[in-house]
Amino acid sequence: MTDRPMDPTDDGLSAIPLPPLPEVRPGDDLGGMVVDAWQRLIAQRPMLAPRPDDVLVVTQKVVSKAEGRIVDLSTVEPRPQAVEFATRWQRDPRQVEVVLREAVEVVRMERGVLIVRTRHGFVCANAGVDASNVGRPDEVTLLPDDPDGSARAIRERLGRELGVAPCVIVSDSFGRPWRWGIVDVALGVAGFAPLDDQRGRPDAAGRVMQATVVAVADQIASAAELASGKTSGRPLVLVRGATLPPGDGSVVRDVVMDAASDMFR
Amino acid sequence: MTDRPMDPTDDGLSAIPLPPLPEVRPGDDLGGMVVDAWQRLIAQRPMLAPRPDDVLVVTQKVVSKAEGRIVDLSTVEPRPQAVEFATRWQRDPRQVEVVLREAVEVVRMERGVLIVRTRHGFVCANAGVDASNVGRPDEVTLLPDDPDGSARAIRERLGRELGVAPCVIVSDSFGRPWRWGIVDVALGVAGFAPLDDQRGRPDAAGRVMQATVVAVADQIASAAELASGKTSGRPLVLVRGATLPPGDGSVVRDVVMDAASDMFR
């Protein structure tokens, strides 16, 4: 961290990592740890005290750990399908078993890749089950049960302890069809609407836009990832300067596409 | 624009819109217009003079216009398939015709939605053909022929005239399967590699990461969109503070997935 008490630029967007967290374990008071990290940031840079249109982006990993969404693979008995797939593609059959348990629908299961729909409706590789950055070799994290609720709890805690409730995103890294590479997206939000529906609003040329709904929360999650980096141990990033669509939003309700609209099952 | 000569925050990421451009028309010297906009920014905020690890994000629309990638729909004779689809789904048959001409493969054509693969390999709605913000009612823009080349040309021009060549992204807004809303992605890059391949690098817990390739350029495009907004007429955004993978990258070569790896045709 810099010790310069500098305000981020007052136009445009800033994404600023909060001080690192200690290792998070099941049952830890994540809300309290976030409050503490933000207080340390404010001590160095008072202008970074929370504002109502700030967004704190929290990576899924620390949320899942604090909520105990961890599975010890040594306790998992893989089904024959998991053993077969894992053997063929050199994967851990116990992890494949956990992914299948988290899936309500297998979208693709081929070439070692397992893309499923989760209970929340997310379509993603390995149901979001992840072995990296867990800290213990046989443990994997699962996605939070209710990521919007997780975001809401952190937002309420920050509001209570810091006097102003910023918006909150719980983020994770997802792959996409047709393009290599992962990007961070929002699993849950609190305090704003994750989509900016600009349909019917005029564009710069005065023409009414037909089909522009911008995934603001997902773009904020991506901006935060750029500021944190994957290996830096900085799971908290403050994003200031985005125009947040008002409303009491939910990723699961608003962003996740219903099965009837999905052309890529 | 602010008149405060303030540096963006010196940790984290900043995305700062450049002064607006005049309307761009075919044959316009876009490189010169970008140089001029950046010079006006520097006049107000000297610390925003270009650095080698800055990224200038330029929206596709102004690139396509300057390169003459515009079609006047009044000259287009739609094929029967375009008329049939357009009539059924209340679309402009001439625009559907242009989309089909830009497509090398139709991925989905149902419920009024037309998702195709372009010559570059992009899979996107309407082949990127777009009527918004064009300025004349019967005109649509096509994607640039060679968006990496477009980015390279702007980068070289900036280097020549401003003394330092920043990196450049040409961006566009794409939808995604399974999630509502569009996000900005990179169509072309110059000066860096669009993917950060972290495979084999240890994570914060010391565990070697298995499959982490981060789509850095796409995330930068998304961050820039947040700073510009769709209706603001600010097609240029400076992104400072991202860690750029070194190399002479290309979106078409590096990010576009080959057909053999594509599980969602």
Image (spheres, coloured by chain):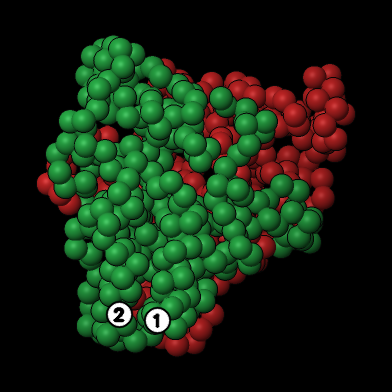
Chain colours: A green, B red
Figure quadrant of residue B243:
bottom left
Indicate which disc, 1 or 2, sits on the residue closer to the N terminus.
2
Chain that bears disc 2: A
Identify the residue under disc 1. Answer: A162
> Does dot 1 land on a helix, a strand or a loop?
helix
Chain under callout 1: A
Using the rendered image of the protein, determine whether residue B218 is visible from the camera's viewpoint. no
**Taking A29 as reference, is B256 above or below it?**
above
Q: Looking at this view, is B263 or B82 the one in front?
A: B263
Q: How many marks?
A: 2
Q: Residues within 10 Å of mark 1 (few under 14, many from 20)?
A: some
* Whole-number angstrom distance, CA of label 1 to CA of label 2: 8 Å
- Type of amino acid under label 1: Leu
**Residue found 57% across the figure and 54% down from its top:** A250
- Image spot of residue B169 (x, y percent): 44, 51
The x, y position of residue B52, in whole percent, is 30, 61
Residue A78: x and y in percent read 27, 20
Looking at the image, which is closer to me, B212 or A67?
A67
Callout 1 touching callout 2 (CB < 8 Å) = yes
**Residue at the spot 67% in from the left edge and 63% down from the top edge:** B231
Question: Which one is in front, B107 or B193?
Answer: B107
Element type at mark 2: helix
State the quadrant of the C terminus of chain A.
Answer: top right
Of the numbered discs in the image, which one, if any, rests on residue A39? 2
Please say whether residue B210 is visible from this viewpoint.
yes
